[in-house]
Image (cartoon, rainbow, N blue to C red):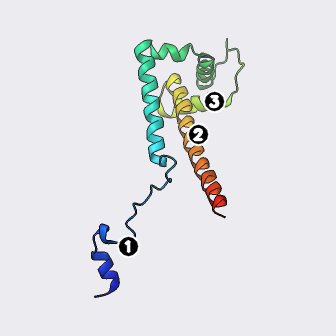
Amino acid sequence: MLSSEILARRKPSESADSSPTPPSSGPNGPSQSEAAFLVVLSFALFISVVALVRNYASTIDNFGDSSAYMSLASAIRRWDFHGIVIKQFWGLPYAMAALSRLTGLSDRTALEVFSLVPSLFSVLLARRLWERLDRGILRDSEL
């Protein structure tokens, strides 16, 4: 019998290296999918709490300059700028109008999509950057 067959037939407890395999992200943090799940869970928790306390749609409409972005996106989609006072960056309303036109979503939902999705991406990017920084620091400390 070949030695590779013997190793393959051994139980995991009988192998020479019986130490558990660490998770792919290392001992210092969650994996990419776990981080995404935590972010989505925090979104759901936040939206649920706000919805329990007050009307969620009116909270979005009356928060900061959200209503100005939504009215500008609506004006872009209809291509009617009468009565619109423009003080915002035009990139977000154009993206909102495009998403709303392509998918049929409301301006409020398009604003939420362009708020939540980049937030998720930024958390995942920060996690990847931190992982690389952590690896670099560990590699330098081993020298």
Q: Secondary structure at mark 2?
A: helix
Between residue 137 and residue 86, name the one nearer to us.
137
Spatial CA distance of label 3 from label 1 is: 57 Å
Spatial CA distance of label 3 from label 2 is: 17 Å
Q: Which of the two labelled residues, at mark 2 and mark 1, occupies the earlier sequence position? A: 1
135 versus 113 height, above or below: below
Q: Which of the two labelled residues, at mark 3 and mark 1, occupies the earlier sequence position? A: 1
Can you identify the residue that label 2 sits on? 122
Residue 39 position, x and y percent, is: 48, 36
50 versus 18 height, above or below: above
* Residue 16 numbered tag: 1
Can you identify the residue that label 3 sits on? 92
Which residue is located at x 34 percent, y 82 percent?
4
Between disc 3 and disc 2, the foreground one is 2
Which residue is located at x 57 percent, y 49 percent?
128
Q: Secondary structure at mark 3?
A: helix
